Image (tube, rainbow, N blue to C red):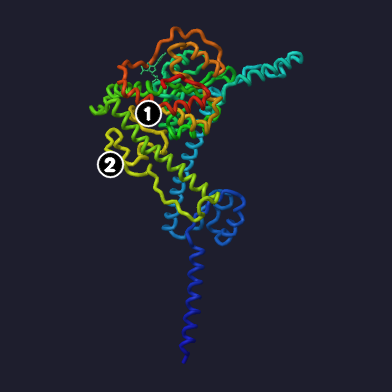
Amino acid sequence: MASLTDKKQIVLVLVIVITCIIGYQFYVTRPQLIVENNNNNNHQQNNNNNHHQNNNHNNNNNENTLAPIKTNTELDANVQKLLELQKQLSVQIEFLNLKVSEQEKLLNVANQVMKRSLPKPTLPPLDQVGDKERDEAIQTRIQKTKQNIPNTCIPTTNGSLACMPNFIIIGTMKSGTTFLDFYLQMHPRLAKHKIKEVWFFNSHYYKGLEWYAKNFEQPTSFENQRVISEATPFYVNHPYTPTRMYAALKDVKLVLMLRDPVERCLSQYHFSLKWIERNKAPKLKPEHTFENLIYEEAEVIQTCVRGNSEYNSKYAQFNKDKEEGVIDMNREWNETNPFTKKHNDKGWNFYEQCSSCDKCFQTGSILHTSGHPTFGMLAKSLYYEQIEYWLNFYPLSQIHIIRYEDLTSRPEGVIRDVEQFLGLEEFNGYGDFVPKNVVSHDDMDPKIREFLVDYFREPNEKLYKLLGRDFGWAR
Ligand SMILES: Nc1ncnc2c1ncn2[C@@H]1O[C@H](COP(=O)(O)OS(=O)(=O)O)[C@@H](OP(=O)(O)O)[C@H]1O
């Protein structure tokens, strides 16, 4: 009798033999669809065909070939597969054709845009100038290059250029920015813009530089380029604008118009009342008088902003003392920044959103982003702090500062100074200089005037010192 192990071995051998037979049958009779497209595959095809010479008469001429078929069902299946494949291929071909035509269209558009919007040089090439005139021609070029206004163009993805302002009026609100923008737009060397205030660096920054450039007439020649300009009065007091502007427009020329801060506050208040009426915005409450808003803001700035800056300098001193060994190295800083404290208990009315101060003055300085037109009447008038911040980015030589009061006494002189700053020739077609964006209003109460004069005395003196110029505002 065979042992159990022997039986197992016999069964195993039988299984292997049967598997081989089935495998061989399956291999030679498997339905297959072979598509040959090049000669490299031919010899493999021929190997297959050697086994099945009866079925392979189609294989001799390098055409798409079907593998051997044994049954009708296999034939049907292969035909179905072939049809399916054909369908797929035609869909793919159609798709590829579509892609090619799309690419061709894009290329055409790009070529047209390039032809249209790339400014062209207009001086004759130097090799077309005679030997005698060459030195002079070179000098002309050098002079032209010197006259060039700051380059603020960037290449776009479609091969054209997007040119942004090379001159921006950055503020301040209610200091005659509309007047200056209006008259400069008449100058033939200024490119026309769609609107005075684009609000790009403060509000629309996320839309990108190409969007920004679309607001301005684009240059058609690199020579005698026109100055591209805009005027957004909120740029100067916006905390993120200087960084953004510097990153995009390092060489841009800036104009800053400054008005006696006391008068500027009142002008902003009355402008806001008009704005609210015009835009059907919620009216100010009866208690939101000019005086009340000023007193409340003074308190907010004192608690939120000044408190924060005192905290910061105290913290800096603490670290310095540690480094210099004045205090123990291991001493921990355990004060809380008052700026981040909640201020609900203050009962602020207009500034109620300052329940935590960073909701109103998010960077802890007087620079702010609030959209309400009456917000920040004092803050917008604290010029020293604004300019000090901008000087981290732009040198004073790049900022032309205009004293608002000069608009009344010498409007033409103000415009001439700007023309000179921009390197433009004098233009004599402005006509009469008429004030723009005027909002008539009563004067303020003497008590609040006194408060404001007092409030701005010190920052004004600091400003005069910083700029080396006395603006002569109320002391
Ligand atoms: N030429 C001239 N001379 C004197 N004053 C002038 C001139 N042009 C404009 N203005 C006064 O400027 C104030 C408007 O400033 P803005 O245009 O910068 O205002 S805004 O921020 O754009 O809303 C606004 O001030 P108020 O009237 O006090 O509100 C205008 O009257």
Question: Percent from the top left, x then y, of residue 425?
Answer: 56, 12
Q: State ligand 1's quadrant.
A: top left
At 49% from the left and 45% from the top, the residue drawn is 317
In the rendered image, the vertical position of residue 190 relative to residue 340, given as above or below:
above
Residue 114 can be seen in this image: no
* Percent coordinates x, y for residue 28 in the rendering: 51, 63
Image point 31% across, 30% down: which residue? 295
Q: Is residue 311 left or right of residue 417?
A: left
Question: Which residue is drawn at the image coordinates 35% and 40% (left, top)?
Answer: 357
Q: CA distance from mark 1 to mark 2?
A: 22 Å
Along the line of sight, the residue nearer the viewer: 66 or 251? 251
Residue visible at 50% across and 17% down in the picture: 190
**Mark nearer the N terminus (1 vs 2):** 2
Estimate the x, y position of residue 225 in percent, counting from the top left: 56, 19
User: Is residue 383 shown above or below 52?
Assistant: above
Farthest left residue? 286
User: Which residue is most to the right?
Assistant: 131
Which residue position is annotated with label 2?
Answer: 345
Check disc 2 and give the amino acid type.
Asp
Q: For the residue labelled by badge 2, is the local secondary structure a helix, a strand or a loop?
A: helix
Q: Which residue is mark 1?
A: 378
